[in-house]
Amino acid sequence: MPSIIGLLEQQEHAARRRVDGLREEADRIQAELAVAEEEWQEWVIARRRVDTVLAPDGAAEAGVQDAAGPQEADGQRASRDAARPKSQVPVWRAGMASSVLSVDYQRILHAAADRARLGQEPLTCQEMAAVFGMDVVPARVEALRSKAKRLVARGWLAEPTPGRFTLAPGVAGPGDGP
């Protein structure tokens, strides 16, 4: 017959496994949510721009507010077609300073620039999370990966091998140029 302590340990171990599994699932869902929210914001911005271009002055405003949600209707009526300051990643072109990017994107560029200056391998998202003092959990890593991929798509970073990021040719790191 098993001891009471042994039975309690089995129950505790089973509960710990369940908690760990649920935490992993929560991290995965959180990462998916972050990516979906960014995608949704891009579609909202695209809708605003299309409405602005296609509609005569003022006619698109009502449709834009419906698509963007209640927070848009309150505070941003006057600048309905303007994104939040520095919320978008512009396509990089020669002479463009990293100051046009939001702080999060500048931090990623800075970390990649530091790695390049030191002659080290390109940066992984796990390494970025550690450098930024974040918990290296799937949700944080995937959020960084999404931002790094956006910087790659816009020409700020290069991804020489999958999952490893470095400055794109010609891009100066923060504080290194224009």
Image: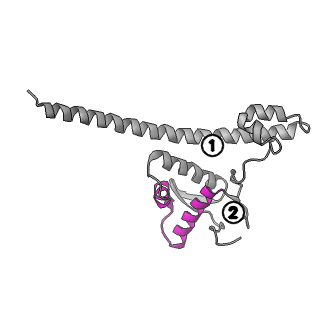
Pinpoint residue 121: horizontal percent, then vertical percent.
48, 65
Q: Nearer the viewer, residue 152 or 96?
A: 96
Whichever of callouts 2 and 1 sits on the residue coming sooner in the sequence is 1
Judge left or right: residue 15 versus residue 85: left
Residue drawn at (44%, 52%) of the image:
135
- Neighbourhood count class around disc 2 (C-alpha, 10 Å): few under 14, some 14–19, many 20 upward: few
Pinpoint residue 104: horizontal percent, then vertical percent.
60, 56
Return the residue at label 2: 99
Q: Nearer the viewer, residue 94 or 89?
A: 89
Residue drawn at (19%, 32%) of the image:
8
112 versus 118 height, above or below: above
Q: Nearer the viewer, residue 56 or 116?
A: 56
Pinpoint residue 125: horizontal percent, then vertical percent.
50, 54
Residue drawn at (81%, 40%) of the image:
77
Looking at the rendered structure, the kind of residue marked 2 is: Ser
Range drawn in magenta: 102-131
Where the C terminus falls, by quadrant?
A: bottom right
Quadrant housing residue 78: top right
46 versus 11 height, above or below: below
Residue drawn at (53%, 39%) of the image:
32
Pinpoint residue 151: horizontal percent, then vertical percent.
63, 55
Return the residue at label 1: 38
Judge left or right: residue 5 versus residue 126: left
- Neighbourhood count class around disc 1 (C-alpha, 10 Å): few under 14, some 14–19, many 20 upward: some
Quadrant housing residue 68: top right
Residue most extreme to the top:
1
Q: Is residue 69 visible?
A: no
C-alpha span from label 2 to label 1: 21 Å
Where the N terminus falls, by quadrant?
A: top left
Judge left or right: residue 53 versus residue 162: right
Q: Is residue 19 visible?
A: yes
